[in-house]
Amino acid sequence: MTVSHEMNRTGVDSRGAIVLYLAVVPWYRTECMHILNRRFGDRVQIVAAAYALDPTVRTGIPRELYSEVKRRELVGGRFLATGIKGAVLGADVCVIDLNPRSLSAWLVLIVRRLQGARVLVWGHLHPRAGAGARTAALRRFMRRLADGVIAYDYDGADAARAEIPTQPVWTAPNALYGSADMVLDALTKRTSFVYIGRLVADKNVDQLVPAFEQSGLWRRGYTLEIVGAGELADVLAAQLSGLADEVRASVTLHGTVTGTAAVRRIYAGALCALSPGYIGLNATQSLSFGVPILFSRNEPHAPEIELVRTGAMKAYEDNTIDGLSLAMNVVLEEAESITETARGQLVEYMRSFYSAEAMAGGIAAALTESPNTHLSARESGVVDWFEQ
């Protein structure tokens, strides 16, 4: 049944209780959660644990926005169980993770199904290993038990509609920033290659420093800036300390930077972003500030790889230090030819389809059983910066 729109005089949606019951809500969901709170007021409750199975993925939204529950890892860390508050089972609508490794999500999904209470699953349609992975069938089963799907990406939403045509599907594209924050803050010259993300093994971040040294770009006044934290932070610091002074002066390890203004300043001087490991939200973030991204093609990319259609991403084949070093030199001339006007065109596209407003809009549409504003993103050719 379609729920009718009811707003009170302050513009706050005045219908029944809503719970977002999620393993974690990372810092980059902050603006999206603020938008939902403004839309639904006190009716929306966010329930999350401190961190996921991967301890580098942590809840980072302001503490007043959510209720924290305890967490427990089971079967040697293969599964996660989190505390279940009464509101999770009693709410009019509940949104849970589309993640078969969350035993709590399974429990809530089954109980609410038996109760006849509306429950939606939110996440990537398939694991990074793809539709043929062992857990893909479990994700499809979770979707069949749910009353609808909120997909992280446009391609995933299209695939979900094709797999289960009778099930409602909404798109809440993975986003980091509100549209007002997605602006160019250009410096007089862009001279840096940038990596922003987690410093973990599957991102191949240990290739960044040696590839930059090998590229020789530091001799021409170019720099490397690395932002993030993780298990390989000490490895990168050791690599940096082993460089000759003239190379080391061209490399900066910033550590964690999450403030939007600070991140925007880093991107303002960036010629190109780097992704030697799999593509994820790093592509969304980079393109949101008009910065193209150079990425290794042969990695198990997350669904954000759909952004390749924009024309602002350049792939290289050899996923080694030598391959990255060569690719940095190859991309240099193409990246230097990109005008600020062209970068602005990309930012406008990202504001329309990959902003916190677009994400919150998809979630709100799912909660109210309303049509999605954006069924799909523009298919291709936002910019034409690289020969693939």
Image (cartoon, rainbow, N blue to C red):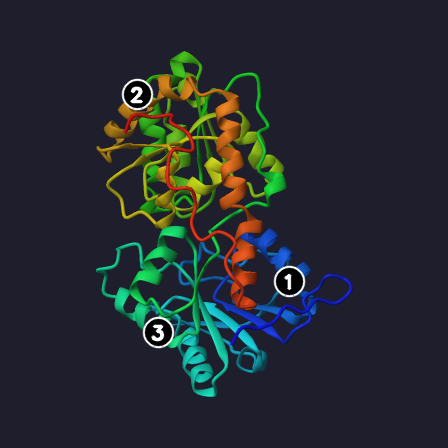
Residue 102 placement: quadrant: bottom left
Pinpoint residue 151: horizontal percent, then vertical percent.
Answer: 42, 59
The kind of residue on which mark 2 rests is Val
Pinpoint residue 195: horizontal percent, then vertical percent.
Answer: 43, 35
Q: Are marks 1 and 3 in contact (CB under 8 Å)?
A: no
Pinpoint residue 16: horizontal percent, then vertical percent.
Answer: 63, 76
Number of on-image labels = 3
Ranked by sequence position, the earlier of labels 2 and 1 is 1
> Are there few (<14), some (14-19), or many (20+) residues within 10 Å of tag 3?
some
Disc 2: which residue: 330
| Numbered disc 3: secondary structure | helix
Ranked by sequence position, the earlier of labels 1 and 3 is 1
The kind of residue on which mark 1 rests is Leu
Residue 259 in sight from this viewpoint? no
| Numbered disc 2: secondary structure | helix
Q: Are marks 2 and 1 in contact (CB under 8 Å)?
A: no
Q: Nearer the viewer, residue 374 or 70?
A: 374
Q: Name the residue: 60% across, 35% down.
A: 262
Q: Is residue 243 left or right of residue 118?
A: left
Q: Name the residue: 68% across, 59% down.
A: 38
Q: Name the residue: 37% across, 37% down.
A: 380
Farthest top residue?
220
Disc 1: which residue: 65
Task: Give me the C-alpha separation between circle 2 and circle 1.
Answer: 45 Å
The kind of residue on which mark 3 rests is Arg
Task: Give me the C-alpha separation between circle 3 and circle 2.
Answer: 47 Å
Task: Give me the C-alpha separation between circle 1 and circle 3.
Answer: 30 Å
Q: Is residue 248 left or right of residue 27?
A: left
Ranked by sequence position, the earlier of labels 3 and 2 is 3
Disc 3: which residue: 144
